[in-house]
Amino acid sequence: MIYAITREVSPAIGQCELTHIDRAAIDVDLARSQHAEYCQLLTEFGCEVIHLPAEPGFPDSVFVEDTAVVLDELAVLTRPGAESRRGEIDSIAKVLAPYRSLAELTAPAMLDGGDVLCVDKTIWIGLSSRTTRAGIEQFERLVAPHGYAVRSTKVHRMLHLKSAVTAVSDDTLLVNPDWIDDHFDGYRTIPVDPSEPLAANVLRVGERVAVSTSYPRTAERLDNAGIQHRSVTSSELAKAEGALTCCSLIFSV
Ligand code: CIR
């Protein structure tokens, strides 16, 4: 069984954290209907969706990915880099507790789930404005005993590592080469279309992949590389600097 934890868009999403983009009005109803489309796609990808109610006190709480990293052996609760987001962890911990043993990062370490890319037993972690070296070191101490190799890589000019690279299969990564230093040796890489710098964040559930409708040229590159995919609309939450992976925590039981 594959589970996907999601959370309804907060009515306070207009007060979200922003780092690299200017604030633009967010239509909450539109964001919710696009998010519902996303949840429906997760269902079509075979997930049992655990949909949590909105958190009016936490504007960014729809972006559940940043609160935990769920591995087969354990779930690591993060300590998000934005102080306004730290209170999002408690409710996620309660939901994960029946499925995984829980470990947590402690102060002063900071780490956002959006900076953590897991491909089989390799975990890349972005050193970013949200994730510190101490966060990466603590995380590594928790996961190394389970056979994971952690590789840190500098993140620049974007919020999270997964804004610049995600996996479309076990051996293929979709990347924005302008935003990452790592060459991801041993993996096939597909560069996003240069006119779509934010397109590297795609959603993957097993062998299924979804691309935002905002990035048709990169979708065409995936077609040409033989990667089948669906599309989903995510333009409204993009105004909150969110993309596709951010809105779910996916794990198997
Ligand atoms: C934030 O700045 O924390 C939110 N406005 C966006 C978080 C997006 N999360 C992600 O990429 N994993």
Image: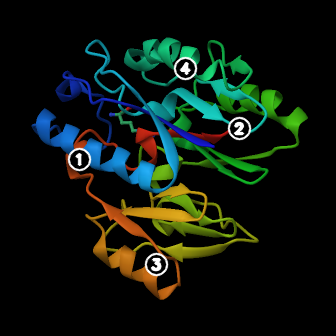
Identify which residue, 70 or 16, lies in the foreground.
70
Dot 3 falls on a residue whose secondary structure is helix
Pinpoint residue 187: horizontal percent, then vertical percent: 70, 71
Residue under the image location 29 percent in, 12 percent down: 57
Quadrant housing the C terminus: top right
Rendered image quadrant of residue 72:
top right
Alpha-carbon distance for marks 1 and 2?
28 Å
Specify which label sits upstream in the sequence, 4 or 1: 1
Question: x and y percent of residue 41 in the render?
Answer: 38, 53
Residue hosting label 2: 71
Measuring from the top left, give residue 103's x and y in whole percent: 72, 19
Amino acid at circle 1: Gln
Give the secondary structure at mark 4: helix
> Residue flagged by tag 4: what amino acid is it?
Val
In what element is the residue under mark 2? loop
Above or below 232: residue 55: above
Q: Residues within 10 Å of mark 3 (few under 14, many from 20)?
A: many
The residue under the point 29% across, 34% down is 18
Instruction: Identify the residue under disc 1.
Output: 34
Which residue position is annotated with label 3?
Answer: 222
